[in-house]
Amino acid sequence: MTTTSAIDFYAVDDLLTPGELEIRDRLRDFCAREVSPIASRYWEDAQFPFELIPKMAELNLAGGTIEGYGCPGMSWVAAGLVAQEWARSDGSVGTFFGVHSFLAMQTIGMLGSEEQKQRWLPEMARIEKIGAFALTEPDHGSDSVGLETSARRAGDEYLLNGRKKWIGNASFADYVIVWARGEDGNVGGYVVEKGAPGFHTEVITGKTALRSSWQAAIELVDVAVPAENRLAECHSFKDVGAVLTSTRYTVAWRALGLAMAAYELARDHALRREQFGKPIASFQLVQDKLSRMLAEVTTMQLLCWRASVLASEGRLTDGMASLAKLNNAAKARSVVADARDILGGDGILLENHVARHFADMEAIFTFEGTDSIQSLIVGREITGIQAISAGGKPT
């Protein structure tokens, strides 16, 4: 009797280019050596492993698909694999990198002028400067289009006032992209640099997920932002939506990474753990659960790969990106729960990693668009009817 690859049941690796495999395997090796051994300790202490940042910089992965400016210009599939591998090791470190590279840098790459890209991206690519993305507010999460943070022109500056919440990296970032509504009613992106007077952050404590990723509440009181720090190509909330669509597919990859880790841990445990004189992997109920977990992981892998290919061709729609996140977050949530069950009592111990993945998946299930919102974005695309807000008007 032979056993098939623990995680690549449908030979998905055959779909990857040598360059994509090199990036994935290089990051996988880094995470095995540097991240996984310390992840649970930092998670329990709710501390971020800042000592990893210089080592992460040496990988030359920040900036993902952005070409030039010191960024790697990797394929969309490779960028997804990067998101997968960070999450497979630790969701918190993956969140740090996702905010910096996929949200902050991608925003500048899409909406910044050439001068702004030259000014900010090279240092961010080297992770000498860290970015954050401040969209969500205390009263506006799913309805972020209704944001209330304001920007008022005052000479050669803009004055920002308002509040933000759940902003990753904000407490230590060098550049925080704050989304605010201008006097004309349109939403713009304003890059607030570290140390700006009136910019106050407080790290949110008491979290039961992504504990070593620092999310912050922000208060802005007449924060002066130079006019040249307003993103030149952002003219309305539609531009914000374009950024979110271009990054949402990476969240599907992150969910896949957690599911892969949980499945592998559960399978390995089932082969080792003996009860009633034999490994629990020999019991029908455990084999059935493992089979169904692998089916979910495999469909997630194929969906992620296809979404990334469509993105590289400029064919990934809002609904497609949302479907990937909707599907994979739900499937991953189920897989990590089954893994926790297979490990039994050992499944709640941080030293065995599954408990951390189980908790972190709850955050991933919600952020960058809840399950319900993703479903309604898909629904809008397949029916032509807007159901997210009252009225149900055709789009």
Image (tube, rainbow, N blue to C red):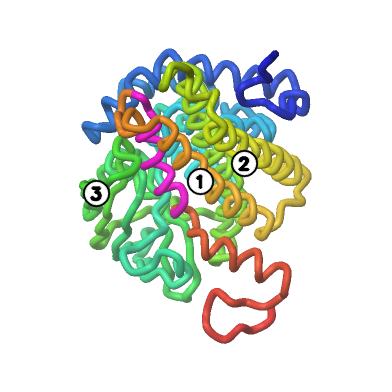
Q: Secondary structure at mark 2?
A: helix
Q: Position of residue 371 (x, y in %)?
A: 51, 59
Of callouts 2 and 3, the N-terminal one: 3
Judged by depth in the image, the label closer to the viewer, 3 or 1, is 1
Residue 296's disc number: 2
Residue 204's disc number: 3
State whether residue 88 is above or below residue 176. Answer: above
Q: Position of residue 48 (x, y in %)?
A: 29, 31
Q: Is residue 153 left or right of residue 20?
A: left
Do callouts 2 and 1 mark residues in contact (Cβ within 8 Å)? yes
Q: Is 359 in the magenta?
A: yes
Q: Residue at x 67, y 60 (%)?
A: 319
Q: Nearer the viewer, residue 169 or 295?
A: 295
Q: Which residues are magenta?
A: 352-366
Which amino acid is tagged 3?
Answer: Ile
Q: Residue furthest front?
A: 276
Which quarter of the figure has residue 150?
Answer: bottom left
State whether residue 328 is above or below residue 13. Answer: below
Q: Residue at x 62, y 26 (%)?
A: 7
Q: Secondary structure at mark 3?
A: loop
Q: Is residue 149 left or right of residue 268?
A: left
Residue 152 at least partly seen = no
Q: Secondary structure at mark 1?
A: helix
CA gap, disc 2 and disc 3 = 33 Å
CA gap, disc 3 and disc 1 = 27 Å
Q: Which residue is mark 1?
A: 334
Q: Position of residue 228 (x, y in %)?
A: 45, 51
Of callouts 2 and 1, the N-terminal one: 2
